[in-house]
Image: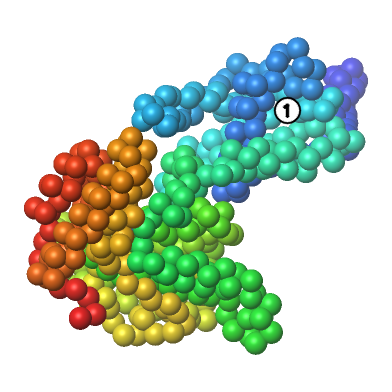
Amino acid sequence: MGLGVGLTVLRQGVVLGSTAMRRRLLVSLEINNKDRAYEWFLAWMAHQTAHVPKSNSLFGLRSHQLSVETQVEQRKNGSSSALFKLVAGPGIHWFKYRGAWMQVRRERETRSMQLMSGTPWETVTLTTLSRDRSLFPALLSEARDLAMHGQEGKLVIHTAWGIDWRPFGQPRQKRPLQSVVLTPGVTQRIEDDVKSFLNRRQWYADRGIPYRRGYLLHGPPGSGKTSFIQALAGSLSYDICLLNLSERGLADDKLIHLLSNAPERSFVLIEDVDAAFNKRVQSSEDGYQSSVTFSGFLNALDGVASGEERIIFMTTNHLEKLDPALIRPGRVDMMELIDDASPAQARTLFTRFYEEDGLGRPELEKLATALEEIVVKEMALGRRISMATLQGLFIRNGAREAVDACRNLFVARPIIGQ
Ligand SMILES: Nc1ncnc2c1ncn2[C@@H]1O[C@H](COP(=O)(O)OP(=O)(O)OP(=O)(O)O)[C@@H](O)[C@H]1O
């Protein structure tokens, strides 16, 4: 009996002792998938496994449970290739970082989902010796730098995912600002305004004015509103947060949250802002009505709960349908018409398209002038052509054919402002 008691005590002692030792000697770091570091860390691990040779003693992932993340990469020539990133799957993995062994435990909670996004909860827990705890921040910043490096020179589009913003697809190639041909002066005006706003943070703070600016680009479809906003964001190294007001499940409170929590250095883009509230009155085909109310939207733009720092771009094809309350200063501080092709815009786009076609300068100029004259004549008859239509025409045809064919593509459209 004495031996039995002795053994039990010994076993308890060993358990308690090892727990105490673990507490004293080990340190753990938990990262859950609500935190941005989660993606960075997994991508960093995948990168290490793929790029660091096994012989490198600094890193060696010991793992038999992998999961795959497939990315489709668009090449410049239009073809695409699939990249398979092997990341550590749920389970326990070991790796060595700067000479220290670390254990990674990836866990997935399948029974409960994140309320808004419907994705399962996941956590990774890193465990290492207490003396190596200073390696955690170093590792995380390395992972972050790697993620940022992958996005450098690219435009990231975020979409709303429940109440969070998530990158949508792969970062895209930036579009040069001058490739969007607007009426002379418009690009400069908007660009100067955004830049001056960005430089005046302190000015706003000193006067107690909320640091926000709203822009509204209006005009017919295919005139370059969205392309311009994306190009501008790219040129300033900003991201785009695409907000769809008619999205299922979006309500006033979520809208406020989203607008107050847009990622840093990003423009919020709300397209076809007129449609969001018209549709609600009619309700969509399946009877669904978005639950963002117009007053909720106005409040989210500038009410007390709205976030401090923000740049919003809105676009519409129908300025006349917008409620005056929406376009008052504070909600929309700058409004610009982005119109159908003017003769000068058509000329510039034409020259950009065909200047490397080997036509020779005099021929190119002659054709550009012919196109310009057609646009002038058609406009006098109240007919316009959109820049998107011209782009499509130029993509499909050679320079001469394009000039000949363009006459048939004009449509009767009143010239705004006349
Ligand atoms: N001013 C422009 N300069 C160069 N390309 C243009 C211009 N306008 C339109 N395009 C081309 O036409 C296509 C459609 O443009 P975009 O989506 O930016 O138009 P939009 O004004 O936002 O249209 P919508 O009002 O229907 O959303 C793009 O591929 C873009 O390259």
Q: Say if residue 17 shows up in the picture.
A: yes
Identify which residue is drawn at 48% across, 58% down.
232
In the figure, is residue 334 to the left or right of 30?
Answer: left
- Horizontal side of residue 112 vs 327, given as left or right: right
Front position in the image: 153 or 113:
153
Q: Residue at x 35, y 80 (%)?
A: 326
Q: Which quarter of the figure has residue 77?
A: top left
Q: Residue 376, relative to residue 389: is it above or below?
A: below
Q: Is residue 91 left or right of residue 302?
A: right
Front one among 359 and 271? 359
Q: Between 343 and 267, which is closer to the camera in this rendering?
A: 343
Q: Residue 59, located in which quarter of the rendered image?
A: top right
Crowding around mark 1 (Cα neighbors within 10 Å: few <14, some 14 to 19, many 20+) is: some
Q: Residue 240, relative to residue 376: is it above or below?
A: above
Q: Position of residue 228 (x, y in %)?
A: 40, 58
Of 90 and 143, nearer the camera is: 143
Element at badge 1? strand
Q: For the view shown, which residue lies furthest in the top direction?
A: 55
Q: Quadrant of the N terminus?
A: top right
The quarter of the picture where the C terminus appears is: bottom left
Q: Which residue is mark 1?
A: 103
Residue farthest to the bottom, as pictured? 207
Q: Is residue 385 left or right of residue 353?
A: left
Question: For the residue with label 1, is its CB less than 8 Å from the closest atom of ligand 1?
Answer: no
Give how far across and how far down residue 327 sits, in percent. 36, 81
Residue 35 against residue 124 in the figure, above or below: below
Which of the 4 image quarters holds residue 11? top right
Residue 348, x across and y down, in percent = 34, 55
Please name the residue shown 82% across and 28% down the image: 98
* Three-letter amino acid code of the residue under disc 1: Gln
Q: Position of residue 329 (x, y in %)?
A: 44, 84
